[in-house]
Structure formats: structure tokens, C-alpha cells
Image (cartoon, grey):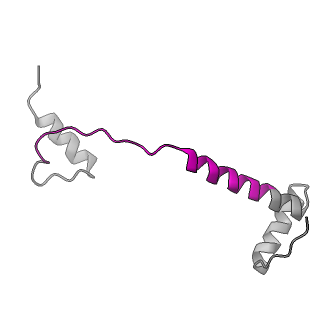
Amino acid sequence: MKICIIIDDELLKQAQIAARNSHTTLSGLVESALMEFLHKRQSSALKKPVELITFKGRSLKPNVDPDDSEALLDLMESLPARE
């Protein structure tokens, strides 16, 4: 099927070079890129959302930044061991 699309000149030049380097036509390159894009999009739509497990308990200790792994490790090492 033939179609007409509007594409940025620089992007077209890069695509033509990529097609030449891949020993394919521009049409073949565009078709492959579209198939890959649609496949990835379909695959990501089929993935289940991640379900996070949470636990009841007290809130975070004061002045603890959960994004600071070094500080969290220091805090965990300073806590008494549980048996």
C-alpha cells in the first residue's frame, strides 16, 4: 500500500542512511520500525500492574530519608538484633 507522510528533513536523511547501512529500503526500515513500535506497545499494554506488598507498623523514624540507602543501612545496623 502506498501512503504519503510528512517527515522532518533531517530525520529522513538519517533514516535513508540507516536503511542503506542495513541493506534495506527506506520502506523496509519504516515498516520494521513500525512493527517493533506496535509490538512493544502491545506487550506493555498486556503486562499486569505491579502489586506492592505493604506491612502495618509504625511510620518512618524522624529524620530518615528513604531515598538515602547509606543512611538506611546505618540505621539498620544500629538497631538491636531480633531473635
Q: How many circles with numbers are drawn on the protein?
A: 0
Instruction: Report which quarter residue 17 is drawn in.
Output: bottom right
Up the image or down, 53 lies above or below 28; here it is above
Is residue 58 one of those drawn in magenta?
A: yes
Q: Nearer the viewer, residue 4 or 69?
A: 4
Left or right: 77 with respect to 36?
A: left
Q: Nearer the viewer, residue 53 or 16?
A: 53
Residue 6 image offset from top left, x and y in percent: 79, 79
Q: Which residues are magenta?
A: 32-60
Q: Residue at x 76, y 73 (%)?
A: 11
Q: Residue at x 56, y 50 (%)?
A: 45
Left or right: 71 with respect to 82?
A: right
Residue 83 image offset from top left, x and y in percent: 11, 19
Instruction: Report which quarter residue 41 is drawn in.
Output: bottom right
Residue 82 image offset from top left, x and y in percent: 11, 24
Residue at the far top in the pictured view: 83
Q: Residue at x 12, y 47 (%)?
A: 59
Instruction: Report which quarter residue 79 is drawn in.
Output: top left
Q: Residue at x 75, y 79 (%)?
A: 8
